[in-house]
Amino acid sequence: MEVKEFKEVREVKDKCASRRYWLNSLTPVSCLLLFLILHSSFSTLHSQTICNSNNASIATIESDGTVRNSSNSTIGCIESDGDIRDRSNAYIGKIESDGTVRDRNNAYIGRIESDGTVRNRNGSYLGRVESDGTVRDRSNRTLGTARGVPQRHAALYFFFDFFK
């Protein structure tokens, strides 16, 4: 059994080494650990589902910020710098690092606070995205869920008209 395990480790090292010369300096065990870490990192990249109040899937947000509707058509994207783009990749708004939300003309249209509270341009309470992903309107009714979705992304989807 031990001979077979070392053979598999050596095979992995050889595969790694053929791709990148610097991997030759790694021990077989280090190379295998690196392979396992990278493999598990890539296999955990996936989309998060947004559901309505009846728990039916209405959208997904992928790890790269792509927003898709229930038919799996791209309806927009939330980029890592906060820019918001529509299905044709046209700029339609921005969420700033402090939670300020702006439209395509850079006009202030609302704010998403760090606790998930969402306010409109006048400061009126629209609702909130709770830490567990539950989305509630101003009357505390459940609009849906966005478990695993960043609070700001869920708030953009439910409370602002970027992806309708």
Image: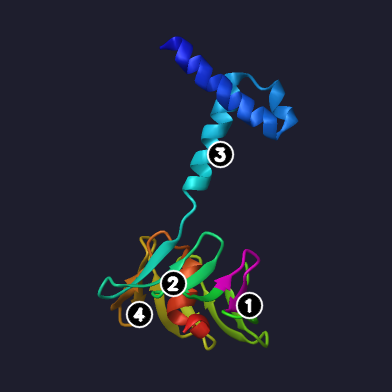
Residue 85, how many percent across, how many down? 61, 77
Residue 136, how many percent across, how many down? 34, 75
Choose top left, top right, bottom left or bottom right for residue 30: top right
The one of 134 and 76 positioned closer to us in this rendering: 76
Q: Residues within 10 Å of mark 2 (few under 14, many from 20)?
A: few
Q: Residues within 10 Å of mark 3 (few under 14, many from 20)?
A: few
Q: Amino acid at mark 1?
A: Asn
Which is more foreground, mark 4 or mark 2?
A: 2
Q: Which residue is mark 3?
A: 38
Circle 2 sits in a helix, a strand or a loop, which is it? loop
Q: Residues within 10 Å of mark 4 (few under 14, many from 20)?
A: some
Which is more foreground, mark 2 or mark 3?
A: 2
Which is more foreground, mark 4 or mark 3?
A: 3
Q: CA distance from mark 1 to mark 2?
A: 16 Å
Magenta region: 77-86
Residue at the spot 46% in from the left edge and 56% down from the top edge? 46
Numbered badge on residue 137: 4
Which is more foreground, mark 1 or mark 2?
A: 2
- Which badge, 1 or 2, is on the more N-terminal residue? 2
Q: CA distance from mark 4 to mark 3?
A: 40 Å
Q: CA distance from mark 1 to mark 4?
A: 29 Å
- Which badge, 1 or 3, is on the more N-terminal residue? 3
Q: Which residue is mark 2?
A: 72
Q: Amino acid at mark 4?
A: Asp
Choose top left, top right, bottom left or bottom right for residue 49: bottom left
Circle 3 sits in a helix, a strand or a loop, which is it? helix
Label 3 near label 2: C-beta < 8 Å?
Answer: no
Q: Is residue 25 magenta?
A: no
Residue 7, how many percent across, how many down? 52, 17
Q: CA distance from mark 4 to mark 2?
A: 26 Å
